[in-house]
Amino acid sequence: MNPTTQWDDEDKRADRAADTFRQLFGASPDGVWAAPGRVNLIGEHTDYNDGFALPIALPQTTLLAARSRTDGLLRLHSAQGDGRITELAVAELAPGVVTGWAGYPAGVVWALTEAGHPVGGADLHFDSTVPTGAGLSSSAALECAVAVAYDELYALKLTGPELARTAQRAENGFVGVPCGIMDQMASVCCTAGAALHLDARTPAHHQQVPFDLQGQGLRLLVMDTGVTHDLADGAYAALRAGCERAAALLGLAALRDLSASELPGALLRLPGELVPLVRHVVTENARVAEAVSRLREGNAAALGPILDEGHASLRDDYRVSCAETDLAAAVAQVAGALGARMTGGGFGGSVIALVRAGEESAVGAAVTAAFEAAGYRAPRILTVTPAAGARRLAAVGAR
Ligand code: GLA
């Protein structure tokens, strides 16, 4: 999708969302907001270790048509849902009360009230193009759309990192997924044409790093393996707990505080099962620094080998890849990609491949053929560009 098509398309989608909102709720929305999904270029499973990551926002977004209410009711509807409107009382929101997709938006309203912000109810209609279950942060897009909309509807004037933190709090405390802050920071704070250099210890200090795919004759493929991951299933929490135990054993606040030169000595002091986890986190933080340097030099093609090394580390040390993501990455590498790796939390999800312009079809076809030969479901392949973070699209209609 080229950027122009994306914006035209988004305007039409915003109009449609506003129309549907009027039909559902009998009044015009106060506005329509958009929040994107993300892919992470490098820096996986580092955020909850206070480390570094380098995500981009996707052109795929969750749109939210929203209107505040004065009676404390929260009414939720999704174009991708079962057609029903979920009705909740803001004052009664509590962890465990709301299940399914509605937990993400309700969780953000809960997190805002928990933080003492004077927010009330709203009518919310969502319409998303972010693929679900693909490791592309469709849940962060849902949360962040609510966070930016509520920020305006209730004049909260929170910063981007504060909104991202609120969305993360919703996921941790309300939905019950112990995720880090990368997905929400990407969805709120990314800018078009750049990757976000995130320091998860101090998210307010993030930096935009120009990532000019078009100008450097490059394309970025996202290949959704169709294998759905579920971060709530305990594996993610166990990995996170392992990292925290390792940091405690080493007397560190977080694994981010271990440098590459200190790594060999530190590994000797850890029980065997924690060694590969720590090795991944420390080398992955170094890969982020390396990737940022290459991008700042204007050499995005040099990300290739860094992506390949990142995949090997997730496969062999962190062990969060699976047969499908390993196959997609390996075939893309052999078929001419400059580099490829799984992205996101793992246990399925998507693989990214950096390719030279003109080679995207050949690489995509090779992966598709390999999946067919292996008896796997056909991957869904997108070509993406670094897009903008969450924003208001339009002041649609009037009360
Ligand atoms: C998921 C989490 C993030 C991050 C990644 C792995 O996407 O939501 O916080 O930990 O996994 O890098």
Image (spheres, rainbow, N blue to C red):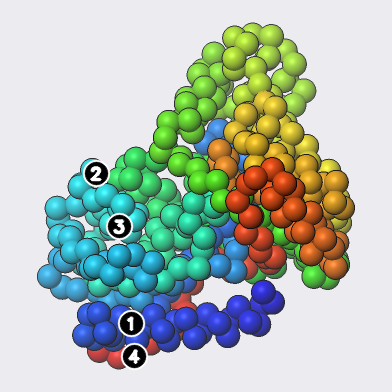
Q: Secondary structure at mark 4?
A: loop
The residue tagged 1 is 20
Camera-side mark, 4 or 3: 3
The numbered dot on residue 397 is: 4
Query: Separation of disc 1 and disc 3 at Cα?
Result: 18 Å
Q: Secondary structure at mark 2?
A: loop
Query: Separation of disc 4 and disc 3 at Cα?
Result: 26 Å
Query: Separation of disc 4 and disc 1 at Cα?
Result: 13 Å
Would the CB of label 1 be found within 8 Å of ligand 1? Answer: no
Give the amino acid at mark 3.
Answer: Ala
Q: Earlier in the sequence, mark 2 or mark 3?
A: 2
Query: In the image shown, does 175 or 199 lie closer to the viewer?
Result: 175
Query: In the image shown, does 41 or 158 lie closer to the viewer?
Result: 41
Q: Residue at x 65, y 37 (%)?
A: 323
Residue 210 x %, y %: 74, 62
Q: Residues within 10 Å of mark 2 (few under 14, many from 20)?
A: some
Query: Separation of disc 4 and disc 2 at Cα?
Result: 34 Å
Query: Which quadrant holds residue 9?
Result: bottom right
Whether residue 307 is visible to the viewer of this picture, yes or no, is no
The residue tagged 2 is 95
Q: Residues within 10 Å of mark 4 (few under 14, many from 20)?
A: some
Q: Earlier in the sequence, mark 4 or mark 2?
A: 2
Query: Which quadrant holds residue 76?
Result: bottom left
* Mark 4 vs 3: CB contact within 8 A: no
Q: Residue at x 87, y 53 (%)?
A: 336
Q: Secondary structure at mark 1?
A: helix
Give the amino acid at mark 2.
Answer: Pro
Q: Earlier in the sequence, mark 4 or mark 1?
A: 1
Camera-side mark, 2 or 3: 3
Q: Residue at x 42, y 86 (%)?
A: 15
Whether residue 67 is visible to the viewer of this picture, yes or no, is yes
The residue tagged 3 is 102
